[in-house]
Every structure is written in structure tokens, then in C-alpha cells.
Image (cartoon, helix red, strand yellow):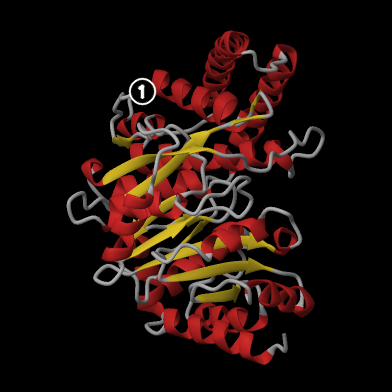
Amino acid sequence: MDFKQELITTLHDIDVGGDTDRLKQAVSEMSHDRPNKLILPILYSEVESTTLPVIRDSLNKCDYINEVIVALSAKDEREYANALRFFKRLERPNLVVWCNGPRINEVLSELKDRELDVTEVSGKGKDVWVALGIASLDAYAIAMHDADIVGYKNDLAAKLLFPVVSDELDFFFNKGYYARIGSATMYGRVFRLFVCPFLDALMKICSSNLFEYLKSFRYSLSGEVAMTSDMALNIRLGGDWGLELSMLTEVYRNTALKRICQTDLGYYEHKHQDVGIGDPYSGLIKMARDLTRTMLCNLNEIEGVMVDKSFMLSLKVLYKRIAQDTVRQYQADALFNGLAYNRHVEETTVEYFADVLMGASMEYVVNPTATQLPDWLRAMSAMPKLRRRLKEAAEKEAESVKV
């Protein structure tokens, strides 16, 4: 049994597959004094999937959740109306926010007129940013999880929320992690073969408490988190695939390590991305590009390390060597457990990641910035009633569409 603690507190699922009614009951009782919200970021395509209906129906049993905020990305009013119709069957109080809809965009355009522009950013990061602003209006704790979870159980949000709402624990931020195994195959390639070896390589070149902290998370790229509303207001978010890492970095900057934890969510599956070979702006290649810029920006901003061509050449060599050693370790683990594992494919993926690392790094040297949204405290100083305006826009959008 794994009891190992990390730099941050790790809450293990020791009673594997056991009864979690105790956690759900505790969160339900605390929801009166410490109300919570659940953010569910979704693409419209997930409304037509076989996975989201299971999540919706399971949430109907989550009486410990005060409200569900659906952060929707839809291309037109037809898709938006279909999403509203779909969530009519969600029995928990809920608000479907069309994050790229006309009314939300109208409010954000006013923010742009006040010289704070978030309209140039699109994607999950911006949708989460909008939803966090709305949710933080009247919640003590905010949980969030992805909408592509296969085998979803109605205790997942309780596992995320309990460490944050419990006055005996009183954590400010909780990161969920889970096994990346499905159909007797190892997944999580970006995390296994890119992020971890990249962090190891960075730590060999420069001593950094930040990268030791990031390494302590069992799965830093998971979309399952919970935090206090105060924390949500103080962190900047990445607007691309660097969202999860940028969130962890901002939490590191804004609170003490003893107020951060990670929780074992057990076992379930997500959808799996293609590598995206031949297209630098799709699949895992796109993820690796965005993550490279995010980590180099952190290295520059927080640790004050100068990133130049010679630095990146050394980093690429180190990364490749460490990643190749990691492949051998995963092969041994897979053979021991009878999992399907193609070492050639894994090593080839490392080669692609190494090229992406170098290419994205050179782009960063020329333009040393990362896509980041402002923290909510700054946004509210520019437009004091922004959160309320966004909520009202979402409510009026729903009222204007016949379902």
C-alpha cells in the first residue's frame, strides 16, 4: 500500500473502492456554511458524446453540490440551445455559460475598452477564467473537473472539495490525480514522456524549488481541482494547454505549501489525444509546445534564469537522455503488469517531443511571453462589477433562447 508523502500533502485512497458516503455527507453538511460550486468546462461536441450524459445523471445524485456552472464553448445559437436542452435534465441548480457567446463577449469588450483585453484569448483557459469569476461571487469553495471522464462516479467532486471545505484540514487548493491506465495500456504520454523528463532536466541545470514542487504532483496535467474562492481570485491562468501547469505555478506563488494538497481519485479514463505528427498545432505536439512556453516563462519570471540558445541546446540533450531512460523504466513496469507497451513508438514520441522542445524554445527566445489571463483581482479593479455583469449576461442569454 502506498503511504508515501510528497513535498505537498498527498491524500491517498487507502480504502480502495470503499464507501465514500462519509465524504459526501461531510461536504453536504458543510455546504451551508461553506457553499461550493462545481465548474464543468465543456465543448459542444461533448454534449453529443456518450460520456457527458452519464456525468449529468450522476450529478443529479450529488446533493452536496450547491450549484453547477457549465462553461460551454459553442459555435452558434443552435449548439447553445441544444446544450441548454441537454442540461434541462440536470436537477442540481445550474447555470450554462456560453463563454464565447454574444452577451459574454459584449461584457468582455467593455473590459477591453478599459485597457484589459482578454478577447484575444480563446479556449478552455478563458472559459475557466469566466466561470471562476462567476462562481466566486457566492461560493467558499470551487471544484472543477473535465467532461470526458469515462466511468464517472458521484463521489469525485466530494473527494476534491472535502480537503478545502473541512475546517479540520482547511487546505486552500487540492489537485486530483488518477491512474492513466486503460484497456491494459499506459496513457498519459505528455506527462510521462515530456513533462516529467523536462522538469528533471531543468532541475539538473538550475536548482529550483518551483520545479521540485511541480515534480511532487502525481499527475500535474489533470483537470480535476478544487480551491477556495479567494485563491481563484488571486491566480492568473494560461490561455492554452499550459492551463494546468500555470495554475499550479500561480498557487505556488500565492500560498504556503502546507495549504496545498493532492488527492487520489482512483481509476477512470479520459479521452486520449493523437500525437499530432506533421501538425505542430494539434494533438500532443500542440500540448508539448504550449507546455514548453509555460515552463520557460516560469523559469524566467520566478527563478530569474536567462533562457538563450545555448541553455536550450543543453536542455534538449538532457531531456532526451532522461526521457529515453524513462522509457526503459516504463517498459519494465508494463512487462511486469502484462500491459501492452511498444518501446519503439514511445522512443519515437520522445524524438518528436525533443524537436518540439527545441522549436518552441527558440520561439520563446525570440518572443519571451506566455499566454496568460489576468488574475480576477486586477480584472475587478478595472471593472468592479465585472463578475456580476458576466453572470447576468449568462442568465439573459439563457432567457433569450427558446428551448
Q: Is 41 placed left or right of 82 in the picture? A: left
Which structural element holds mark 1? loop
Q: Residues within 10 Å of mark 1 (few under 14, many from 20)?
A: few
275 and 203: which is toward the camera: 275
Q: Quadrant of residue 284?
A: top right
Identify the residue at image location x=31%, y=25%. 3
Identify the residue at image location x=49%, y=81%. 391
Identify the residue at image location x=35%, y=65%. 233
Q: Quadrant of residue 79?
A: bottom right
Q: Relative to residue 297, is residue 133 depicted above or below?
A: below
| Residue 156 coordinates in the image, percent (x, y) | 46, 50
Q: Is 317 placed left or right of 355 in the picture? A: left
Does residue 239 appear in the picture of this structure? yes
Q: Which residue is mark 1?
A: 2
Q: Relative to residue 285, is residue 326 depicted above or below?
A: above
- The kind of residue on which mark 1 rests is Asp
Quadrant of the frame with the N terminus: top left
182 and 322: which is toward the camera: 182
